[in-house]
Amino acid sequence: MQGQPEIDNAPRQQLVLLNSVADGETHAISPLHRRDLVLLALLGLVAMIAVLYNFVIATPRYASEMSFVVRTLDRSHQRFSFLNVGSGGSGDDDSHAIVAYIESRDMLASINADQFVSRIFSAEGVDAFSAFPSWLAGAGEERFFKHVQDYINVRFDAGTGITSVSVQAFTASDAKRLAERLLAAAEAKVNQLNARAHDAMVSSAEAEYKAADADLGAQLAELAAVQRRTGVIEPGLEAGAAIGVSSDSASALSQINVELANTIRVAPRSPLIQQLQTRRAAILADLGRQLAARSGDKGSLAERIGPYMAVSVRLNVAEKRLLGASLALTNARNTASSNRIYIEWISRPGSPDIPAYPRKWFNLLAVVLVAAGLLWIVRSLSDLVMADD
């Protein structure tokens, strides 16, 4: 009877032992559970960092925006339309040039000539991620240029030809002033491009006009010298006068010949015959002198007219050259004027009321989603590794 309790206690002891083992397995943390806790802790840490930066550390940034199109005078009828009728902007190449200038070091040097931009980023209260110079952003002109580019956003829409510019700063007034400086720099660049295009198109035409004008002046001076040297003022008038004199003398000679012939026939012994013959000889001698004066070798009208006519031909060519150069210059100036580009502003820089950056809740949500996605990928890969083991 005394051994019966011992037999009954054996199963009970085994049951207690099994229960204690089961309880130990229940309280132990599995590797998978430990991994999930670590991943959740990492996600919480990333979220806390995002909250700390966006809501505590980051300095609010204000954005001043503007938009414009680049036009040319010869296509001014193709105005911007909200209906977007027709093709895009007429000055796409010029718009790309302005966009490239806005994103260039030359533009930064222009708007930062008085260190205005440098003072914006080195102002007191700007966080270490936005300030320059800083231990994160570094120092130097190259790093400063790249740093500023993060705060100037330029977008060109090829469909409408509209260029939109957003400029960020840490106060509303600085954002507006910075955008206005960028606007002025863009307009100055447009004027510079117009001046260069005008010089390229008009300078050659102006040079040709000046050369033609100088050539005409030289030919006029040569003509005056020839006139003084030869005494020929107007060859046509002098030749006409000489021919007229010769014609009168020939007519007088013809009359004397007729009168002499009649006198010889009627009164062969008349003393008038001798007088008529003398007058006839004088007229013949005068005709000879007139002919020699017109076409003789030395000092004749023909000899004196030769240099005059040579200069006159060159003068005529110079006049035509000057006329052509004048027309070409006028056409070049009209073309240069019609091809001038200008900025047509759709909206000018304004003063923002509230900071646009950082977009706190958006940034936080994006960081959490990205971090959660990456951690999920890590968890999935670890499951595959453990399954293979």
Image (tube, grey):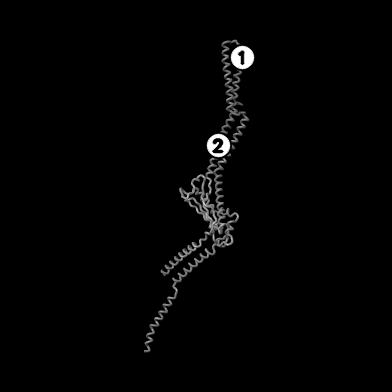
Q: Are marks 2 and 1 in contact (CB under 8 Å)?
A: no
In x, y percent, where is residue 164? 51, 53
In x, y percent, where is residue 381? 43, 66
**Which residue in the structure is indicated by mark 1?**
275
Q: Compared with residue 101, is residue 20 higher up or lower down, i.e. above or below?
A: below
**Which residue in the structure is indicated by mark 2?**
323
Q: Earlier in the sequence, mark 2 or mark 1?
A: 1
Q: Residue furthest bottom?
A: 1
| Residue 151 in sight from this viewpoint | no
Q: Residues within 10 Å of mark 2 (few under 14, many from 20)?
A: some
Say which residue appears at 39% left-offset and 81% top-offset.
15
In x, y percent, where is residue 157? 48, 52
Relative to the observer, which residue lies in front, 8 or 286? 8
Q: Is 274 positioned to the left or the right of 10 in the image? A: right
Q: Compared with residue 48, is residue 190 higher up or lower down, i.e. above or below?
A: above
Image quadrant occupied by the C terminus: bottom left
Secondary structure beneath label 1: helix
> Given the image, on which type of amino acid does mark 1 rest?
Gln
Instruction: Determine the CA span between mark 2 and mark 1.
Output: 62 Å
